[in-house]
Image (tube, rainbow, N blue to C red):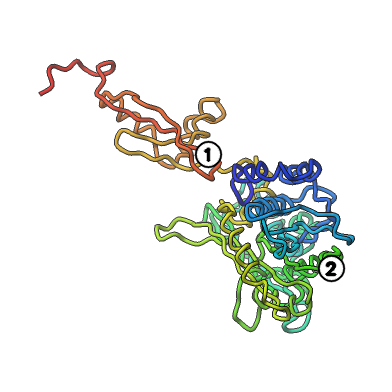
């Protein structure tokens, strides 16, 4: 599963298929399915396209939903190749009925995937867990505190965690931490700690014997941009600016930045790190031919009821060195485009974790069940998996969060039978509700009754 529901992705594909070339459509579908890399030399995160990358699956999602939404606002051509230059912009847009308002734009999805590769804290946890699992310990209770190193001068630096290289982690854990971890596995009831320190590798591990569910880590933030030019957003904008300059198009040019899980897209007002506005405006200051940059973010917040809520946000940046005569018209088009974007289902970070974790990749089923007087709603997918024998009754009940079996027990005890079954579509979700309605008492399963008083 990606950022958006699979049904919304398919709806965008269906809306684009009449005017995309077969080659273009096949490439997008291949990238979405993870079977075909992008044809471009590099994506926004800097991956070489020699094999499937989860970040490119999400980049394809953003490209698709953005094209689909913009296509509802006017005439759109994808990768137009007759502009006279060496590169093909993602978007050529012309407002319907207008020969004046048109622009080209590139879509880029920015993530912190390279920073995570350079700072393999999750892989370090994985190496520790693999070692402990061999000796019957789940790694619950392990807390790793890692120090950091800095590169570069103040306001132009980046943070690197003081860890071994990713390729060396399993060998390092076995050699340097084997004895300590064997002690934990041998006596899981005893707290323990150890430290390791060299010039480049520095960390402390503490084991809490009373924690039997989670492992954790503490480390300096390495994805926050401490340099206005050395960060994923600035690097991606620079690459896209150079590509657009080679398009041969002399009119208005813009860039649409989409969130693939990148801290550089957050706004900041402190003096230590740079915010999205500072990074984008620095880019626009040095690129007079780029008129605008639209940044689309996805954020998770808590609903007043305590439930997580996923919401998109956006901001349009205008080049202060250029005329503003087209600002209101273009901003209105982009505002309409944003209104047509589907609602995100998960954050980009969670979507990347699911794709990296090699889960089945299908859309998220509806969780839990909904019960009222004589009525219950159950996930259509969960019910079908149960009837198909894919899951046990115990696993089915656990997935629903509540216990629907008690609902059915009550219906039988009250002599109620099923009177109606229907399907309730859950719009923009990857599942539907099966609605079962019971009423009675029914003499088929209850005592006979005399005249009703």
Q: Residues within 10 Å of mark 2 (few under 14, many from 20)?
A: some
Query: Left or right: where does residue 334 sit relative to residue 103?
Result: left
The secondary element bearing badge 1 is classed as loop
Q: Residue 202: give its label.
A: none
Residue 194 point in image, percent of width and height: 65, 66
Counting labels gives 2
Q: Quadrant of residue 374?
A: top left
The secondary element bearing badge 2 is classed as helix
The answer, for residue 168, to whether it is visible in the render is no
Residue 254 point in image, percent of width and height: 73, 67
Q: Residue at x 66, y 41 (%)?
A: 14
Residue 420 vertical placement versus 428 (above, below): above
Tell me the CA gap for discs 2 and 1.
44 Å
Q: Quadrant of the C terminus?
A: top left
The answer, for residue 7, to whether it is visible in the render is yes
Q: Residue at x 86, y 64 (%)?
A: 248
Residue 217 or 24: which is nearer the viewer? 24
Query: Left or right: where does residue 82 sit relative to residue 19?
Result: right
Q: Residue 245: give its label.
A: 2
Residue 141 point in image, percent of width and height: 56, 57
Residue 311 or 321: which is nearer the viewer? 321
Query: Left or right: where does residue 188 sit relative to residue 223?
Result: left
Residue 278 point in image, percent of width and height: 67, 78
Residue 29 or 220: which is nearer the viewer? 29
Query: Left or right: where does residue 346 sit relative to residue 324?
Result: left
Labels 2 and 1 touching (C-beta < 8 A)? no
Q: Earlier in the sequence, mark 2 or mark 1?
A: 2
Q: Nearer the viewer, mark 2 or mark 1?
A: 2
According to the image, label 1 marks what residue? 431
Residue 199 vertical placement versus 142 (above, below): below
Residue 185 or 359: which is nearer the viewer? 359
């Amino acid at each position: 599963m990606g950022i958006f529901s699979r049904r919304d992705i398919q709806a965008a594909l269906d809306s684009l298929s009449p005017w995309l070339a077969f080659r273009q459509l096949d490439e997008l579908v291949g990238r979405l399915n993870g079977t075909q890399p992008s044809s471009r030399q590099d994506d926004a995160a800097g991956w070489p396209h020699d094999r499937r990358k989860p970040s490119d699956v999400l980049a394809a999602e953003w490209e698709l939903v953005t094209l689909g939404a913009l296509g509802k606002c006017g005439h759109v051509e994808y990768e137009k190749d007759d502009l006279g230059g060496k590169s093909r912009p993602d978007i050529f847009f012309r407002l319907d009925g207008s020969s004046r308002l048109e622009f080209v734009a590139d879509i880029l999805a920015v993530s912190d995937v390279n920073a995570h590769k350079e700072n393999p804290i999750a892989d370090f946890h994985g190496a520790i867990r693999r070692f402990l699992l061999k000796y019957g310990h789940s790694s619950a209770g392990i807390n790793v505190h890692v120090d950091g190193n800095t590169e570069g001068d103040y306001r132009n630096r980046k943070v690197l965690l003081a860890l071994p290289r990713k390729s060396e982690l399993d060998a390092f854990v076995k050699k340097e931490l084997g004895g300590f971890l064997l002690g934990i596995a041998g006596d899981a009831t005893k707290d323990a700690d150890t430290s390791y320190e060299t010039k480049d590798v520095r960390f402390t591990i503490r084991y809490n014997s009373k924690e039997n569910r989670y492992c954790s880590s503490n480390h300096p933030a390495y994805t926050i941009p401490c340099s206005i030019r050395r960060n994923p957003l600035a690097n991606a904008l620079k690459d896209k600016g150079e590509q657009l300059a080679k398009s041969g198009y002399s009119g208005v040019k813009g860039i649409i930045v989409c969130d693939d899980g990148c801290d550089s897209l957050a706004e900041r007002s402190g003096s230590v790190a740079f915010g999205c506005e500072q990074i984008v405006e620095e880019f626009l200051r040095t690129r007079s031919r780029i008129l605008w940059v639209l940044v689309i973010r996805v954020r998770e917040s808590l609903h007043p009821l305590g439930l997580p809520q996923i919401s998109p946000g956006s901001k349009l940046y205008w080049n202060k060195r250029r005329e503003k005569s087209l600002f209101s018209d273009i901003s209105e088009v982009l505002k309409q485009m944003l209104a047509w974007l589907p609602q995100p289902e998960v954050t980009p970070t969670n979507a990347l974790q699911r794709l990296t974790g090699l889960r089945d990749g299908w859309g998220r089923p509806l969780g839990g069940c909904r019960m009222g007087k004589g009525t219950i709603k159950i996930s259509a997918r969960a019910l079908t998996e149960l009837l198909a024998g894919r899951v046990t009754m115990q696993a089915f009940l656990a997935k629903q969060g509540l216990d629907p079996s008690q609902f059915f027990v009550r219906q039988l005890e009250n002599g109620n039978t099923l009177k109606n079954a229907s399907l309730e579509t859950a719009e923009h979700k990857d599942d539907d509700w099966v609605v079962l309605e019971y009423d009675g008492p029914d003499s088929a399963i209850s005592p006979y009754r005399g005249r009703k008083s």
